[in-house]
Image (tube, rainbow, N blue to C red):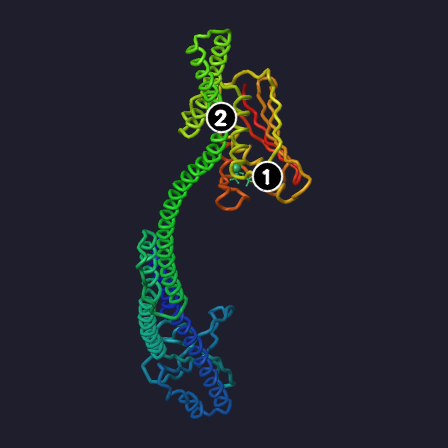
């Protein structure tokens, strides 16, 4: 069964009040009445005994006057109804076989005609007690009748007092009940309602604190809790806001970083283009020299031929000259084509990668880019020299690759290798021969390309970082830290291959590319 707190308080108080009322209204007056009656009865009996003793002594002396005085001893008692002297006589039946006791009222006070001799008994209105006496003159009983009016009055007044006390207790109970429900149930109900609202998300709730007792403490604690909650919620709100602001800022930074990364990738491309241009210039120089030389020789030959024809002195020479001329034109054509292919290569590199795979001769590509990057570097630093060693597996079939992309990877690996050996040479400044080796080989279904240099190698603590974007040990402006990271992406994502590094610090570094054949 569900009882509210208020009901419980009222029930408790009501049961306490009822218990008190039962004691004060029923139990206590009954007990008191019985006690009074018992005392009164004893008192009457004592009086009867006293009178009987006085009468007995007086009759022994045959002094009737004294006997009367003894009886009148109780006369002044306000409760006295009557006092009688009853004489007992023994009477025999006719055959004188069976005695019987007859009683005769000898004297009664107050002097009513013939008081009814009642047996000593107690009823509501009268108490009758008898006390025996014997003397030579007569034997009998002193019978005392006392009214219980006084006791009834006492009982009545006790009951009245009890009623007043009960009413008072009832009123006090009512008052305590009201007070308790005011003091306990009201704040508790207020707390409950406020807590419900807080649960629904309303953190403006505040209950009034009326007392300094536990409920007051509870109310204060509740208010503090709600206050703290609201504070925390605000803080959370603020931190959420600042978080989303930070998020937005981070997003911005990320976008900026992406833009910057693109720029850097572009600048890495430009840097490698720079390397290339120098190499290409060097490379073109060579066929151009041939073209120039052969064309000069051809001009001379043509002049010679003209002279021969003018003199009409046709000799076998003409055929020789024409043969030479043809040869020259072929060489010019050959070197012209070489220059053309170099320029095409340069254009190809500078163009955005088409991503188109073509069957490519890896050996040729590796060789071409090796020379380009070497001469590119030498164009910048004339003092630099290195031994280039190639070991190409001639059995290598053409592979399907994006030549611009793989070219870029090779260019980066070569440039790194040359940088490393150049640095070591500068540091050692003596008996050191820089060597860069390029090697290709083919093992079942994979083509391996290895670029190895005998430079400073890579320290163990850096070996795990070199493929990370922007990791560089080179001075700003010289390294972007993107070469290997781009190479890694081109080889793994673009071509499904792998690129690994092997190095011993101070001795060598080798980059091994594996491509599916
Ligand atoms: N052959 C090599 N020998 C020694 N260190 C190398 C070699 N190749 C790459 N590294 C190291 O790896 C780093 C990253 O190379 P890379 O990604 O090409 O960026 P960058 O050349 O711009 O520094 C270089 O700065 C260098 O420390
Ligand atoms: Mg590099």
**Would residue 391 be found to the left or right of residue 355 on screen?**
right
Q: Earlier in the sequence, mark 1 or mark 2?
A: 2
Specify whether residue 95 is in view: yes
- Mark 1 nearby-residue class (10 Å; few <14, some 14–19, many ≥20): many
Marks 1 and 2: which is nearer the front?
Answer: 2
Task: Give the residue at mark 2.
Answer: 289
Residue 7 point in image, percent of width and height: 33, 58
Residue 37 point in image, percent of width and height: 41, 75
Seen from the viewer's position, the closer of residues 515 and 167 is 515
Residue 490 point in image, percent of width and height: 48, 29
Task: Give the residue at mark 1.
Answer: 420
Specify whether residue 125 is in view: no
Seen from the viewer's position, the closer of residues 466 and 426 is 426
Query: Residue 39 lies in what quarter of the image?
Result: bottom left
Q: Give the position of the C terminus as an image quadrant.
A: top right
Seen from the viewer's position, the closer of residues 377 and 15 is 377
Q: Separation of disc 1 and disc 2 at Cα?
A: 32 Å
Seen from the viewer's position, the closer of residues 213 and 197 is 197
Asked if residue 493 is positioned above or below residue 14 in the image, the reply reads above
Q: Which mark is residue 207?
A: none
Asked if residue 389 is positioned above or below residue 47 in the image, the reply reads above
Asked if residue 1 is positioned above or below residue 479 in the image, the reply reads below
Picture residue at 52% right of the left edge, 42% below the top: 471
**Would residue 14 be found to the left or right of residue 508 on screen?**
left
Asked if residue 391 is positioned above or below residue 57 in the image, the reply reads above
Query: Residue 173 lies in what quarter of the image?
Result: bottom left
Does the residue tagged 1 have its C-beta within 8 Å of any atom of ligand 1? yes
Circles 1, 2 touching at the beta carbon (< 8 Å): no
Q: Judging from the image, what secondary structure is the residue with disc 1 in?
A: helix
Picture residue at 32% right of the left edge, 59% below the top: 189
Picture residue at 38% right of the left edge, 67% below the top: 216
| Name of the residue lying farthest toward the right | 431
């Amino acid at each position: 069964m569900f009882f509210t707190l208020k009901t419980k308080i009222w029930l408790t108080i009501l049961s306490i009040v009822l218990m008190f009322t039962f004691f004060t209204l029923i139990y206590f007056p009954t007990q008191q009445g019985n006690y009074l009656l018992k005392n009164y009865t004893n008192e009457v009996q004592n009086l009867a005994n006293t009178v009987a003793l006085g009468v007995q002594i007086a009759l022994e002396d045959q002094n009737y006057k004294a006997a009367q005085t003894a009886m009148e001893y109780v006369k002044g008692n306000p409760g006295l109804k009557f006092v009688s002297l009853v004489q007992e006589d023994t009477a025999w039946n006719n055959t004188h076989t069976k005695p019987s006791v007859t009683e005769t009222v000898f004297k009664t006070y107050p002097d009513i005609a013939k008081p009814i001799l009642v047996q000593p008994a107690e009823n509501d209105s009268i108490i009758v007690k008898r006390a025996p006496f014997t003397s030579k003159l007569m034997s009998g009983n002193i019978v005392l009748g006392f009214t219980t009016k006084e006791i009834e009055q006492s009982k009545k007044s006790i009951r009245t007092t009890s009623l007043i006390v009960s009413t008072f207790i009832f009123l006090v109970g009512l008052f305590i009940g009201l007070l308790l429900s005011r003091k306990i149930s009201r704040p508790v109900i207020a707390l409950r309602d406020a807590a419900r609202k807080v649960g629904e998300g309303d953190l403006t709730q505040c209950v009034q604190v009326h007392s300094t007792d536990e409920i007051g403490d509870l109310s204060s604690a509740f208010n503090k809790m709600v206050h703290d909650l609201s504070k925390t919620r605000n803080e959370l709100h603020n931190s959420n806001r600042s978080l989303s602001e930070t998020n937005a800022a981070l997003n911005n930074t990320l976008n900026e970083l992406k833009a910057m990364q693109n720029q850097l990738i572009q600048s890495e491309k430009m840097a490698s283009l720079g390397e290339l241009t120098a190499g290409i210039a060097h490379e073109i120089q060579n066929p151009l020299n041939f073209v120039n030389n052969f064309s000069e020789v051809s001009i001379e030959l043509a002049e010679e031929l003209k002279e021969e024809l003018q003199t009409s002195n046709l000799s076998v020479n003409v055929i020789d000259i024409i043969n030479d001329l043809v040869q020259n034109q072929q060489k010019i054509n050959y070197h012209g084509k070489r220059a053309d292919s170099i320029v095409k290569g340069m254009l190809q590199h500078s163009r955005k990668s088409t991503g188109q795979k073509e069957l490519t001769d890896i050996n040729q590509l590796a060789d071409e880019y090796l020379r380009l990057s070497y001469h590119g570097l030498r164009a910048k630093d004339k003092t630099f020299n290195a031994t280039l060693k190639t070991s190409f597996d001639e059995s290598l079939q053409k592979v399907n690759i994006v030549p611009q992309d793989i070219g870029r990877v090779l260019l980066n690996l070569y440039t790194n290798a040359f940088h490393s050996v150049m640095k070591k040479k500068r540091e050692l400044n003596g008996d050191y021969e820089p060597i860069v080796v390029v090697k290709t080989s083919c093992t079942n279904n994979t083509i391996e390309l290895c670029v190895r240099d005998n430079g400073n190698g890579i320290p163990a603590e850096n070996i795990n970082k070199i493929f990370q974007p922007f990791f560089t040990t080179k001075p700003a402006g010289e390294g972007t830290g993107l070469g290997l990271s781009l190479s890694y992406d081109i080889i793994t994502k673009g071509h499904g291959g792998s690129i690994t590094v092997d190095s011993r610090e101070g001795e060598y570094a080798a980059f091994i590319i594996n491509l599916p054949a």
